[in-house]
Amino acid sequence: MMTKIDYTKPWTSAERYRPYADYSTDYITALTTAVDKSAYRNSYHIQPKIGLLNDPNGFSFFNGKYHLFYQVFPYGPVHGLKSWALMTSPDLIHWTDEGLKLFPDTIFDSHGAYSGSALPLSDKELFLFYTGNTRGENNSRDAYQNGAIYTQTGNIRKFDTPLLRTPEGYTDHFRDPMIFDAHGHKFAIIGAQTSEEKGTVVLAQATNDSLTAWDYKGQLQFTQEEMGYMIECPNLVFIDKKPVLLFCPQGLDKSIADYDNIFPNMYVIADEFDSESATLTQAGKLHNLDDGFEVYATQAFNAPDGRVLASSWLGLPDLDVPSQADGWQGILSLVKELTLKNGQLYQYPVVETISLRHEKQNITLSEVATTIDSNSYELEIELSEDEENELYLFASADNSSHVSLKIDVKNGKIELNRANLPVSWAENYGVTRSTYVAPGKMKLNIFADTSSLEIFVNDGEKVMSSRIFTVPENTYLFAKSSLPATIWQLKK
């Protein structure tokens, strides 16, 4: 008889940090069966085989392929004992699951291999920089910034001792090292909390070519505002030679930057990166990276082909999601290219995403239902000046259940509403999200998957990314008034 497991029950600390070897074959089989039966499994997004996926890690190009690691707890849909899993791809679309690679198996990462980054040292070695989470008596915690080498043959070799330890003046919330090249040197930025419980970003510099020795340079200066009580997942990339800082401030005062999610994912564009003074010079305003319901921990890197590529966790910390009842949670976004246009950050799925398209149809959405094969499609819509309309996606046959997208071109406003879904969650943070662009003609590219929705406005001027949980039969489209559109079903 197969083991029955209630994945929604509270998990104790002992259960979350249980050694992997203690999980029985019956347990793993039951978990795998539950996940395989889940109605929320996506078609073309990266998702865990079982358990929990959260932050993308180590996004890089190595050994002729893109490497995208992600944080995973493979034995339950909760935040537990984390490892890194690896996906590889020749084209950012077709991914091969390489399995678990970086395990919590030393005294410096005993309670989790937490987030970090990667940088090729040669054609044969990929340097991994990650946070090791350890816990002691009374649940005390220490964080270590550890190094490892991932080889061309797929093996991991960890360094014997941490590369960086938490300096004085900071709490144990010190994590997520992101390595990058600048001015002929290797640097890393780390998310941190000061002893006064203020969020900040710390800069370090490698002092040798093997990246085994590092010195702290101080706190990265990019704003005069207080950044809440913690900053997670900082990334520094260079677009048209301008530094762009991506980061996740926790506890940010909404008078500094308005947001609706429990924690925002934000960005700042600057003129220069001054490594000597640890400053982003002429840093601009803080902006939300994404105006949807769920996006966090975005990781970007400067790829060797000149593009800046990014992947996001379509999820948020400290929130339960409906798929947990099926033994899993968390997906990654489509891979996006980041560009700058008129001083603003644009994000749009990489051009390779076109290869997912098939079965193109020119349709007219209206009050009469448009039936589609599945919620796995790209919908492209262009609206003229002064036009107003409302789309209904993931809809039931009578449109009583749906996700609505209200579009007001005249005022440049788009409002996403998921109040009318059969599965509700995270309602404490509201049921609508809005974004704004300059009034005028508007183009939308809407990527729907079984339990996700990524909306790109004007080729990436604004983005709204969200998880959508509904019943399998809700595969209809409606519009408040007649609206021509193009739709492609997307391949798995």
Image (tube, helix red, strand yellow):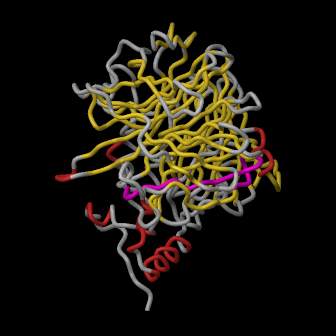
Q: Is residue 378 visible?
A: yes
Residue 86 in magenta stretch = yes
Q: What residue is rendered at 39% in x and 53% in y?
A: 112
> Which residue of the protein is positioned furthest toward the bottom in this rendering?
1
Quarter-wise, where is residue 121 in the image? top right
Residue in front for this viewpoint, 141 or 239: 141
Quarter-wise, where is residue 46 in the image? bottom right
* Placement of 144 over or under 88, stated as above or below: above
Q: What residue is rendered at 57% in x and 57% in y?
A: 47
Q: Point out residue 113 in the picture as x, y percentages from the top left corner.
A: 44, 50
> Which residue of the protein is positioned furthest toward the left in this rendering?
138
Residue in front for this viewpoint, 389 or 270: 270
114 on left or right of 405: left
Q: Point out residue 76 in the picture as x, y percentages from the top left corner.
A: 41, 65
250 on left or right of 339: left
Q: How many marks?
A: 0
Q: Point out residue 201 in the picture as x, y percentages from the top left corner.
A: 40, 25
Residue 62 in magenta stretch = no
Q: Point out residue 49 in the picture as x, y percentages from the top left corner.
A: 56, 65
227 on left or right of 446: left
Question: What's the magenta region?
Answer: 79-95
Quarter-wise, where is residue 17 in the image? bottom left
